Image (cartoon, helix red, strand yellow):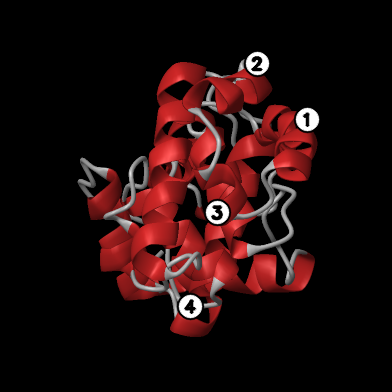
């Protein structure tokens, strides 16, 4: 199967079966989404969603969080992975947003990546989810699924994967496709013992052909 046909089959399948795929993180504003994404690094969305209601009740904006201490933030996120570093990042991030961006989350990749604790993946999530721009955040799920299916070739880093996916997926589907691949990796194409019998795109999957062929 040609690569373009593989991408077409993937898009056709998910466009029919999950056209409105979206983030499973709970948030009420771009700032709250940013906080949730920072917290979600190497942590489940389910755990983050258990922590953020109390956090957002107390610190629902960059301004209110910027006035808190690291220890106060830490007390509310201590059940999250790497709470100490994340509390420090949230404190510094909120202060920078207030000081340099008037309390509003910046809307460019360059400015987002200046924020403490915000790397390329998190910045891409903000562009795609908060601001509705074509973007392809690559987390561990997207990285794994893209390689397994054979959507990318010799992609050694998340950036390699991002660039190849962006080249082949039309802009109108790009941000949604991020959620397609992420959710597929989270629930079907799992890291261990993937549920191939439940997979609707297994006929285009290189790994399935290798293991079952």
What separation in Å lies between label 1 and label 3 (alpha carbons)?
A: 20 Å
Is the Cβ of the residue at disc 4 closer than 8 Å to that at disc 3? no
Residue indicated by mark 2? 79
What separation in Å lies between label 4 and label 3 (alpha carbons)?
A: 22 Å
Front disc: 2 or 3: 3
What separation in Å lies between label 4 and label 2 (alpha carbons)?
A: 32 Å
- Residue 33, image quadrant: bottom right
* Relative side of 148 to 44, left or right: left
Question: Helix, strand or loop at disc 4?
Answer: loop
Circle 1: is it few (<14), some (14-19), or many (20+) Cα within 10 Å?
some
Residue indicated by mark 3? 62
Residue indicated by mark 1? 50
Q: Which label's residue is closer to the chain start, 4 or 1?
A: 1
Circle 2: is it few (<14), some (14-19), or many (20+) Cα within 10 Å?
some
Q: Is residue 7 above or below residue 172?
A: above
Question: Helix, strand or loop at disc 3?
Answer: helix
Residue indicated by mark 4? 133
Q: Which label's residue is closer to the chain start, 1 or 3?
A: 1
Is the Cβ of the residue at disc 2 closer than 8 Å to that at disc 1? yes
Regarding residue 33, the answer to whether it shows in the image is no
* Relative side of 80 to 7, left or right: right
């Amino acid at each position: 199967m040609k690569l373009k046909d593989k991408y077409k089959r993937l898009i056709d399948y998910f466009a029919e079966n999950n056209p409105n795929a979206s983030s499973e993180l709970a948030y009420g504003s771009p700032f709250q989404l940013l906080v949730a994404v920072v917290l979600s690094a190497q942590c489940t969305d389910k755990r983050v969603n258990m922590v953020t209601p109390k956090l957002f009740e107390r610190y629902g904006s960059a301004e209110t969080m910027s006035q808190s201490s690291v220890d106060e933030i830490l007390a509310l996120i201590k059940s999250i992975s790497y709470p100490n570093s994340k509390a420090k990042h949230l404190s510094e991030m909120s202060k920078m947003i207030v000081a340099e961006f008037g309390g509003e989350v910046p809307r460019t990749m360059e400015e987002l990546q200046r924020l403490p604790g915000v790397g390329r993946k998190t910045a891409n999530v903000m562009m795609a989810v908060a601001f509705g721009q074509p973007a392809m955040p690559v987390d561990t799920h997207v990285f794994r699924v893209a390689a397994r299916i054979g959507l990318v070739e010799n992609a050694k880093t998340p950036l390699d994967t991002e660039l190849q996916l962006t080249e082949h997926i039309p802009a109108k589907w790009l941000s949604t496709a991020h959620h397609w691949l992420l959710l597929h990796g989270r629930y079907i194409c799992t890291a261990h013992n993937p549920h191939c019998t439940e997979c609707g795109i297994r006929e285009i999957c290189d790994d399935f052909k290798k293991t079952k062929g």
